[in-house]
């Protein structure tokens, strides 16, 4: 026998043709008449040094640790010259394996799947070596929908920090500058008497959302590479108060000496973040 191909995503049952009693047959992933490793499972008759004959049979299944680069040998356990190896293929990826409980319930947790379309199915193997497969299920993995990047800020971040589809000075602006003051406004102190009754984010989520704006420098409104309460935070809340801080009043004693944006550009930058993106 030669050029026998097995797909490691399948389960196979081996039995003797015409119940032959000559040349007892067995397989191993280690070598001739060597006990198999835990990478494969053999259930049924025969053993590594005494293969099947007559009406005997066994079932082979491949475990997650086995890959098609490994070897799988078949041989006659009575004649060392009668041995060869299978050609192995792998058409599918095993996402995970699980052992069902007494009621037949099981679950798996997969690694993260990349974007794309997948066909998945479950394959079971009972203690007698019987294998069954479910119908295939097609699923699509899409990237999370993100807000549209603003042409001025280059970010998806907006100043609607509580997610109520509005940007206000005594709400969003106050929460931003509070966050920039640090631990003084930890926990619920951040949102006290500032969060909207229509908010779609919780206090914890608002903490996280504003922190993202700090970490990716969306809130670095003057572009000096830092986000500060008495600089960026003050200019944000001033802008949200409207015409009272028109022109240079927006940046007076708040703009950084290292700013890369001038006053007009900062006006534009903060205005861009007040446009609420209903997707984001």
Image: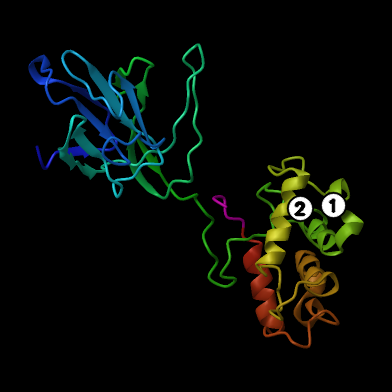
Give the camera-side residue of 149 and 96: 96
Within-10-Å neighbours for mark 1: few <14, some 14–19, many 20+: many
Give the camera-side residue of 159 and 186: 186
- Give the left or right position of residue 184, taking residue 225 as reference: right
Within-10-Å neighbours for mark 2: few <14, some 14–19, many 20+: many
Q: Secondary structure at mark 1?
A: helix
Percent position (x, y) of residue 196? 77, 45
The answer to whether the residues at label 2 and label 1 have Cβ atoms under 8 Å apart is yes
Q: Secondary structure at mark 2?
A: helix
Q: Residue furthest bottom?
A: 257
Residue 277 magenta: yes
Q: Residue at x 26, y 42 (%)?
A: 91
Residue 46 can be seen, yes or no: yes
Percent position (x, y) of residue 233? 80, 68
Placement of 220 over or under 165, stated as above or below: below
Extent of the magenta region? 276-280
Q: Dot 2 corresponds to which residue?
A: 207
Whole-angstrom CA distance, mark 2 to mark 1, is 8 Å
Q: Residue at x 34, y 30 (%)?
A: 121
Query: Residue 87's image quarter?
Result: top left
Q: Residue at x 72, y 82 (%)?
A: 263
Percent position (x, y) of residue 9? 29, 36
Percent position (x, y) of residue 215? 69, 65
- Give the left or right position of residue 81, taking residue 251 as reference: left
Q: How many marks?
A: 2
- Give the left or right position of residue 217, taking residue 112 as reference: right
Q: Residue at x 65, y 80 (%)?
A: 265
Give the camera-side residue of 102 and 28: 28
Q: Dot 1 corresponds to which residue?
A: 190
Residue 32 magenta: no
Mark toward the start of the polypeptide (2 vs 1) = 1
Colouring scheme, one of rainbow, by chain, secondary structure, one colour:
rainbow
């Amino acid at each position: 026998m030669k050029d026998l191909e097995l797909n490691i995503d399948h389960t196979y049952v081996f039995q003797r043709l015409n119940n032959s009693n000559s040349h007892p047959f067995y397989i191993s992933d280690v070598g001739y008449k060597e006990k198999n490793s835990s990478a494969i499972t053999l259930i049924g008759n025969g053993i590594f040094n005494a293969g099947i004959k007559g009406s005997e049979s066994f079932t082979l299944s491949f475990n997650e640790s086995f890959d098609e680069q490994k070897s799988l040998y078949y041989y006659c356990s009575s004649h060392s010259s009668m041995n060869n190896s299978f050609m192995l293929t792998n058409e599918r990826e095993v996402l995970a394996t699980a052992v069902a409980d007494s009621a037949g319930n099981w679950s798996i947790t997969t690694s993260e799947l990349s974007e794309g379309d997948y066909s998945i199915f479950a394959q079971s193997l009972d203690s007698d070596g019987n294998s069954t497969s479910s119908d295939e299920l097609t699923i699509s993995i899409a990237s999370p929908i993100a807000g549209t990047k603003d042409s001025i800020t280059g970010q998806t971040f907006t100043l609607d920090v509580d997610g109520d589809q509005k940007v206000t000075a005594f709400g969003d602006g106050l929460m931003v500058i509070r966050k920039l003051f640090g631990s003084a406004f930890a926990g619920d102190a951040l949102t006290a008497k500032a969060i909207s009754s229509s908010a779609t984010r919780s206090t914890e989520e608002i903490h996280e959302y504003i922190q993202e704006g700090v970490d990716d420098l969306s809130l670095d409104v003057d572009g000096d590479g830092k986000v500060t309460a008495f600089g960026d935070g003050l200019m944000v809340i001033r802008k949200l108060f409207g015409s009272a801080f028109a022109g240079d009043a927006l940046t007076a004693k708040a703009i950084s000496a290292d700013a890369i944006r001038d006053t007009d550009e900062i006006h534009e930058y903060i205005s861009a973040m007040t446009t609420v993106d209903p997707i984001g």
